[in-house]
Image: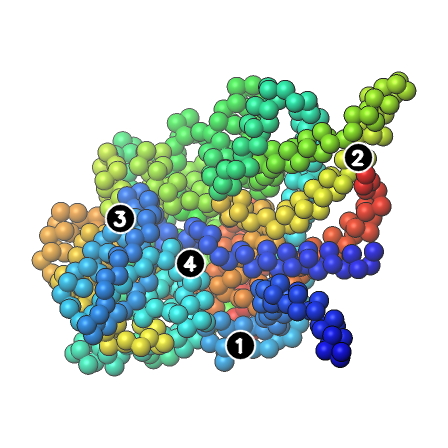
Amino acid sequence: MPNRGWWALLRPYVMIAPAMAGIGLFVIYPIFYLIKLSFYKYNLMNKAKSKYIGFDNYQKIFTRDDFYQALGNTAVYTVGVVAGTMLLSLLVALWLKRKTRWNRIVQAGIFTPHIVSIVSIALLWMWLMEPNQGLLNFLLKLFGLPPSAWLQSSKTALLSVILVSVWQSIGYYTLIIVAALQSIPPTIYEAAALDNASRAKVFFRITLPLLSPQLFFILVIMTIGSFKVFDTVQVMTGGGPNGATSTIVYYIYQFRTTNIGYSAATGVVLMAIIGLLTFLYFRLLARKVHYQ
Amino acid sequence: MANKIRGVLAATALMGVLAGCGGGNGNNAAPNDANQGASSSPSASASASASPSAEATGGGKTTVQFWHSLGGKNGEYMDALIKRFNDSHPDIEVVGTFQGGYDETVTKLQQAIASNTAPDVSMLERAYVQMFADSDVLEDMKPYLDKSGMSPDDFTAGLMGHSYFDNKLVSLPLNRSTPILHVNKTLLDAKGLSVPKTWDELKTAANALADKGKGQYGLTMPYDTWYQLAMITQAGGKFFNDDKTSVDFIDNGVGEKVFAYLKDLQNAGAFYYPPQQDSGNIVNKMFTEGKVAMMYQSTGSIGGLMEAVNFDYVTAFLPKDQEYANPTGGANVTILSGSKNKDAAWEFIRWMDTDPQGAQQFIVQSGYLPFTKAMVDSQEIKDLWAKEPNRKVAYDQLQYAVDTNMDVAWPEVMHEFFSAIEAIMYDSKDIKSTLATFKKEADRILNQ
């Protein structure tokens, strides 16, 4: 029957059509719209006044110092948050590996920041970091250390924001790593014990390789997430002082009212950067990941 | 492998876009523009989204959508005003909606206009009026004014600066304010100082009042462009040149003078420049606690400060250099061209501007400036001023009101000006080269 051949050919497309319709409408169409916007000096309220300006927006992006500042801040933030969180969650996870009651309480405590709204957390830390009355400076003074200006100096502001983000995300990633640790077959460790392997060797030759799929997942997810950081910056610093904490997404946001075409062009650049980074990760690291 | 990479690439690329788009929605932006003091005075800091319930609008009633930016106490006063209007107009129903701070209202309004869901009437922060008018989305109100037998001369001249665009009357004053000098007279009296009238006197007083040991400063101001704008005009400069092709205050040295003045005071420990987040509330708090003796701040905070202070609190004109001068702030009211109920919308504005039960009550309650001559002459305002002379000073200062930052491109240039202010005030960057960089960016924006 000719009909059957038709159907066999069409069936997969019909099956994925509902999902593709959603993706097309909410993902693919917006991307092309974004790219289109980036070539215009766009007037949202009166389309007749929009002007096609070719690559001017892109040219502007790459000649402006504040874009490079935002890019640099984002890079420092990403490296700081990803490295800090992964290292600390790994250490905490190794500590909490054993299933004791006490460990469960600690784990619940560490996890709590993750379920609290990041806005509340940011506001809370703003109090702690207040230079004159804040608790952190009080503690520093108590131990005879010089107080810091925290969020209010362009030298320490980005570091302060990183600190808050790391503090907030450790619990969640600890949970993932603990779960991974507990799923490593104990027989492997027993074999290592029989061979009298040192603890360092056990960690680097057994634990770390077997954790690599989870660590790789965390690395990719956190890099993407950190590149998109917005909420902490918006609440805690507004990008300041003097652009010291302005990240790319916040940079895009700042132009929303006055120059939406420029915002769109920066969005396209961000998309390219994240795409490239993820590509590099998969190229360079995928081979080092051991799946059981 | 290649397929897998492509898939991941696409997925992450999409995430990037979503990240870029997500930024604009829903996040409660602190209004960074010239007037946050007005809406964030201590008494009005708790912002509550209060939109009066739209009652059944049957029976030939015309519904007028009205967007405003007043939360907290001022929002309650606005709701009361809308209720008074609805009670006295059986055929019109005004639905007021609080849309967040000024900047947020502007962002929402832009999106609403693009999608044809804009309100009939909207409050619009005065510096954005030109930008909206340039897109031809604001209705010319002059014909309506004529029809109602009113004239632009009925309004206080100093507050009409942002009302015209291309000879069209695109907005009328509503909740307006200006920057003013707030003084803790108890502290000044203790040192035998009088309220400063000039920059030199201000410098002397601020230095005399600064006390590192007690953590006390002489002078402060919120993080904003407003106060630097005021000082530029006081020093005889203008923000934009008359042709709006460049910024005027840099090559003639005025900008350098203004910032050097502030920087000297800051370095001497006499001037406190607050962090940008929540700066209005921070300086208000310092002032009420007696930690700073003098403060440049919006007239909109007079009411809140009067309730909060327990010392002799007076207001005065911003000190002069070459001359007295001050910009204006706050918001105007506009009719959107896309509205289908323009007559009803106009009736709402006409009633606010002329009826003693209209905006006049709102002005008395909130502390914004009276904006029509009839309001100023009314017994109610006269009584108020006799009781609270601090508010009269604010109105009297309007005779020196001058807005030199009016242009379609101001919101964009403002962004660059903020960067310059931050570089100089927070990071002590070289004033001359920072302003030169600012001028280059501003010129590029103005000439594109």
- Residue B88 percent across, percent down from the top left: 13, 65
Q: Which of the two discs, 2 and 1, sits closer to the camera?
A: 2
A13 left or right of B49 in image: right
Asked if residue B369 is positioned above or below residue B315 in the image, the reply reads below
Which residue lies under the disc numbered 2?
A: A210
Asked if residue A248 is positioned above or below residue B343 in the image, the reply reads above
Identify the residue shown where x is 71% and y is 73%: A7
Which residue lies under the disc numbered 4?
A: B103
- Kindly give the residue lying farthest to the left in the view shown: B379
Q: Are marks 3 and 1 on the same chain?
A: no
Which residue lies under the disc numbered 3?
A: B73
Q: Secondary structure at mark 4?
A: helix
Residue A104: quadrant of the picture: top right
Distance between mark 3 and mark 4 Cα atoms: 19 Å
Q: Secondary structure at mark 1?
A: loop
Q: Residues within 10 Å of mark 2 (few under 14, many from 20)?
A: many
Which residue lies under the disc numbered 1?
A: A50
Chosen colour scheme: rainbow
Q: Callout 1, which amino acid?
A: Ser
Distance between mark 2 and mark 4 Cα atoms: 51 Å
Q: Which of the two discs, 2 and 3, sits closer to the camera?
A: 2
Residue B447: quadrant of the picture: bottom right
Q: Residues within 10 Å of mark 3 (few under 14, many from 20)?
A: many
Tell which subunit mark 2 falls on.
Answer: A
